[in-house]
Image: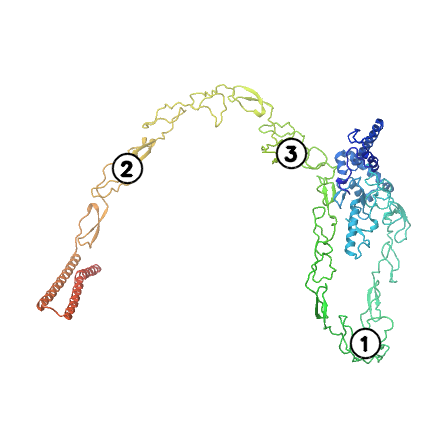
Amino acid sequence: MEPAWRQQGRGRGRSQDPQGERSRSPQKDRPGTGRGGGGRTKTDRAEPPQGVSVQSKFEQIRKSNQAAAQRLAESHLGSSSEDDEENNDGDHEDGKRGKILASTFTTYTNQTGGDATGLVRTGRYVSDLFQSGALTCLICIASVKRTQPVWSCSSCFSLFHLPCIQKWARDSAFLVSSVTDEDFGQNQPPWPCPKCRAEYRPSATPNRYTCYCGKLQDPPADPWLVPHSCGSICQKELKPTCGHTCLLLCHPGPCPPCPKMVSVPCMCCKAKPLPRRCSNKSWCCQQQCGKLLPCKQHTCSQLCHTECSPCPRVSVQRCVCGGQKVERPCADPQWRCQQVCGSLLSCGNHTCEVVCHDGVCPPCPRSVSRSCPCGKTKSSLPCTEEVLPCGDTCDRRLSCLKHTCSMRCHRGSCETCRQEVEKECRCGKYRKLMPCHKEYLCDSKCPRTRSCQRHQCRRKCCPGNCPPCDQSCSRTLGCRNHKCPSVCHQGSCYPCPETVEIRCSCGSTVLVVPCGRERSTKPPRCKEACSCPPSCHHLTRETHRCHPGACPPCRQPCLLQLPRCSHTCPQPCHDLVLVKSQQVQLAGPWEQPSEPAFVKKALPCSPCQVPIPTTCFGEHEVSRVPCHRQGRFSCKRPCGRPLTCGNHTCSRECHLVTAGNKCVVCEESCCKPRPCGCPHPCPRPCHPGDCPPCSQMIRQRCHCKISLLYVDCTKLSSADDQTKVELGSCNNQCPKELSCGHRCKQVCHPGVCEEACQQKVKLRCSCRRIRKEFPCSVQSGVQCDDVCRDQQRKVSQLKEAEQRAAEEEEQRKLQEELEAFEKRQQRGGRRSKKRGRRGEVDDERGRMGRWWRRCAAFVLVPLGGALLSAAAYYVLTAA
């Protein structure tokens, strides 16, 4: 089918008749003929008469108008079923469709007495012609219109555009011949149907647009006939062949079963013939067959039927050789016992080795003329002797079929050919010396393209006969939903075999369309009532037909109970109302709004307007107000309610008394007398009844004048003397000091502290060995005992001994120094150098010794005395 841009235009004045174009072509070339009118040009030589030019223009305009009207009518008739459903009323269209179907099936239903059970399959094909989107060309995935030339497959009855199926047939035949034929173009391969793959001969390629029955070429588009039908009786030969023809009007799809009535006997031909429908003329008389079965022993026990089945019984039968008897089915009398015959052959030397056979045993196979193993020497020997090898060269062909066996005549098969020959690889690119029995395959990969014209062969050492492509096609089909599952191939893929069910909103009406058309096909029209649940608060919708898309807005009264009253809303349902959305101001025309202009929202019910009698807050008057404003109101008069103090009335304007909005509180102070001893006034304003107890706190110092105490006024004023003393105490220890220097142990108290200090003190003797505890008020001195005196005497003796030893040591040192000085004075004169040095060394040694003795006298002696004192003290204390 040509694309839209190549079809003829629809403008005014353009005719589809080629003769009209030829008739106007001379006028275009004629000088003086212009498009805008009959104006003269510089090249004009003669002007025709005015009457002739006006008449020719009138005829031209009349023809163009007729052509435009014809195109308009054809476009209306050629519109798809989708356009018909949009432009025509649904009830009128259904009635028209019913009349067309009734006229098509009338001749058949007249024969069947109104029974239409055989028309189910054919009726589905006819109904699809009127259904929106049901007719789709599987090649171009486009709708089939009623004025477009089509072709119907005789196997699957699918409709295709005539140009599409012609191009499909040419492409299929070209691809098959280019792949399979060496002499391209000589043979004419068949082409398949795009849907069912039924093959057609090249001569069956459609070249004419005919009706379904093939009687009329280029059938006109009649709105009162089935599209692409000639309107006459089909008259195709029915299948299975019964001798009758189809009685329907020219129709798509298969012909229905034969409705003719014929007189036929039963299947066993025992009963009398009965009138039966030709399409279902086989019938059973329910009598036993009784025919003799092929086993020649039993008769058929089945009920009336056409052909008897094999005998199901069992009988004793002999094998072919007659050696064994076994029970076997009667239907299989021939069987072999699998035992070797073993009879003596005619030679008298050997036995028959054939398994169970009938007739005479074959002759001995060794009694005929025999040859040696290589076949060169023939001999006629008795069957008891073996034919020996002849000793000549074997010369039998080896497995390579090029060389012969070089061994002597031998039994068994010849060895493998091992001669070195120059062999050519399978692809013919390389040659190599190798054993004859081995095949030479090179490693080069074939660069040729396989039959799919998409992938390379890539087989090692390919001889040129590349195998078919084994990869999956996986190209996206025309439906844009699935991929081609076939092996990679050349040319266009077959149409998608899948179908998609498009249902109406309620699901009761189903339309089956080819895969890929579900996006452009509208849902089928349904005669049932819409079953969509209501989207508002009503239990049921207003009754209307099933439809695609959203249901119309509900027109029923709202009748919802209004809030805060018992009345119902009288307005139409407003659960889903189109409301203009609040869109943001766009910066310019290049921006797109983010939200739609109108959105569906649930609007609240309008306020209730029912008048209700209502009293004011202070119950001064009664007025009628709308229900949505129902509530007590202020009449602007003074309130007049008594205050809580019981002495005054409310002076505010008429108001509602609630927990948060009460009458004014009396602001005068309380003047009632206070209890005895309470210096504080009543904190409450004017109030009824007695004043509450005083809740003030009195601040005062404790008895010890350190802490501040807060005492409840009521407790202090009503307490006795003892309780007042307790209330004035801070309950801490008294901070005052006694005359002994210790702190008072009593709790904070009034008056002077008691001098009897009971705190315990520790006392020691003069040597500090004995320690005792006494109360502070009765303390006395601790005297040393005899042990203390002995210890003091020993310590004093040790000290005296140490002192005497130190003095004696000091006297000894002084005496030694004096003696040394006197010796130096007595020697006098100059000493020798050697003796002087020796004397200096001795003097130095003497000085060092004196220094160590002084250290021992001043350090070690006192340290030893201290150690002895400690040891004595430890011994005495331990004793």
Specify how the rendered protein is coloured. rainbow
- The answer for how far apart the CA atoms under marks 3 and 1 are is 105 Å
Rendered image: mark on residue 706: 2
Residue 323 shows up from this direction: yes
- The answer for how far apart the CA atoms under marks 2 and 3 are is 82 Å
Residue highlighted by disc 3 = 536
Residue 161 shows up from this direction: no
Residue highlighted by disc 1 = 375
Give the residue type at disc 3.
Answer: Cys
Q: Is residue 575 or residue 192 the one in the foreground?
A: 192
263 to the left or right of 172: right
288 to the left or right of 827: right
Q: Given this view, does label 2 or label 1 mark the residue nearer the observer?
A: 1
Q: Picture coordinates of residue 576 (x, y %)? A: 64, 33
Give the residue type at disc 2.
Answer: Ile
- The answer for how far apart the CA atoms under marks 2 and 1 are is 151 Å
Q: How crowded is mark 3: few (under 14 residues within 10 Å), some or many (20 or more)?
A: some
**Quarter of the rendering occupied by the C terminus:** bottom left
Q: Picture coordinates of residue 477 (x, y %)? A: 71, 48
Q: Given this view, does label 2 or label 3 mark the residue nearer the observer?
A: 3
Q: Are marks 2 and 1 in contact (CB under 8 Å)?
A: no
Which type of secondary structure does the marked residue at label 2 adopt? loop
**Lower position in the chain sequence, tag 2 or tag 1:** 1
Residue furthest to the left in view is 826
Q: Picture coordinates of residue 127 (x, y %)? A: 79, 41
**Quarter of the rendering occupied by the N terminus:** top right
